Amino acid sequence: MIKNAIAKIHLWLGLTSGVIVLIVSLTGCIYAFSKEITEWRRLDASYVEKQADSTIPVSKLWEKAEEEFGTEKKISWVNIYNDPKKTWMFYTYKPNPGGLTYFSSIEHYESLFIDPYKGEIKAVYNEKLDFFNIVKYLHWSLLLKTEIGQPIVGWSTFIFVILLISGLVLWWPKSFKTAQNRFKIKWKKPTKLYRKLYDLHNVFGFYSIVFALLISLTGMVWAFRWFQTTVYVVAAGTTSPPDVSMEKSSPENYIVTNPVDEAYSQTRKKYADANAFRISFPTDSLGVINVYVQQKEGMYYISHQLQFDQYSGKLLKERKHSDKNFGEKLITANYDIHVGAILGIPGKILAFLVSLICASLPVTGFLMWWKRRRNRQQISLF
């Protein structure tokens, strides 16, 4: 009786959310190795030969990048890598709050790769039309404005979590002594199509359920503020929010010639072993120079944030990874867990395979329902 009710809930929730789950899972699968593929595609623009012991100052390269982009496109941030053979990447990004789709909600989004020793521009890319960025936003909000698309994706993911749990309940055998058939697919036996679909749906769903739940729940952290808050409170053991306050620059401070160079120099000395630095310049007179430090290549869960006065280059605030409580660290690690990067390449392969299985579940589930429905219709004709 209870299993019949769960089966009906499982069916109708699956039919309701199936298309969205298929799109989100497939795009997640495609995006799994986006970083590696993009670096391979842009290999010539990403690397240079080290020409000197020191690079051209950030401020000079910043000016050159702004000159290349034009007066209407201000630099939003720059990525600087510790690897002396890598180019520096300047980005210009301007959103359009009135846009309803991904394409209309971004006025421009471009990147410029520059040789930090010669000041030579290696390449300029339109990131707005980049294949993997389109895939990312299809995954993120179905190419709709975040406020519209992300709740759709979020609630579909929430339903998928219910489907995974209810599917496990339906799969669960009365006795494991007679449950061997539930752990393997009968590839060689001449079973009917429905049975093949049943095996594919149930066996793959069972073996991937733990990782599928992990990917789904980490996705919900971004989709719902209440869920992110719950994860933070449970992990941190406190209801006190993390310290994300922003300092303010003072125009009355002593103005140094190049405060961005001063900010970069101080950060580089503090974190000489870091993988990369991301510097964002303020957009108003009271804003600060923000520096984000990525400690490990390809991972974001160990990071530090520094804020500098835009006039003097003085350090106003520093938030090290070690200063964060476990809740903050877990939220920071959310992306790495979601894409499998927390385990390196093996983790990404695992995330790729699990996403592929998740994409297959609504397909096999729908085909099972359709096949059963057709069989019932044929029986009713006689």
Image (spheres, rainbow, N blue to C red):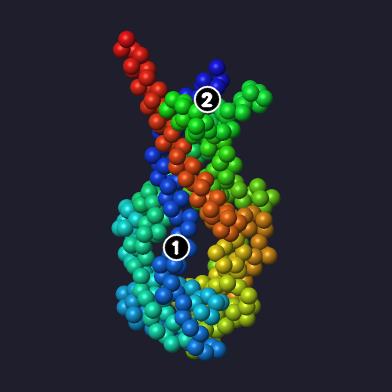
Up-down relation of residue 21 to residue 135 (above or below): above
Q: What amino acid does circle 1 point to?
A: Ile
The quadrant of the picture occupied by the N terminus is top right
The crowding category of the residue bearing disc 1, from other C-alpha atoms within 10 Å (few below 14, some 14 to 19, many at least 20), is: few
Up-down relation of residue 49 to residue 279 (above or below): below
Residue 10 x %, y % = 48, 29
Q: CA distance from mark 1 to mark 2?
A: 42 Å
Residue 32 x %, y % = 48, 55
Residue 110 is marked as none
Looking at the picture, tell me which residue is in the foreground, 136 or 102.
Answer: 136
Residue at 55% x, 70% y: name it.
292
Looking at the picture, tell me which residue is in the foreground, 382 or 225.
Answer: 382
Residue 108 visible in the current orientation? yes
Residue bearing the label numbered 1: 37
Residue at 33% x, 16% y: name it.
378
For residue 300, side relative to residue 62 (left or right): right
Residue 211 x %, y % = 57, 45
Residue 288 visible in the current orientation? no
Closer to the chain start, of discs 1 and 2, is 2
Residue 259 x %, y % = 51, 83
Residue at 49% x, 77% y: name it.
86
Between disc 1 and disc 2, the foreground one is 1
Q: What amino acid does circle 2 point to?
A: Ile
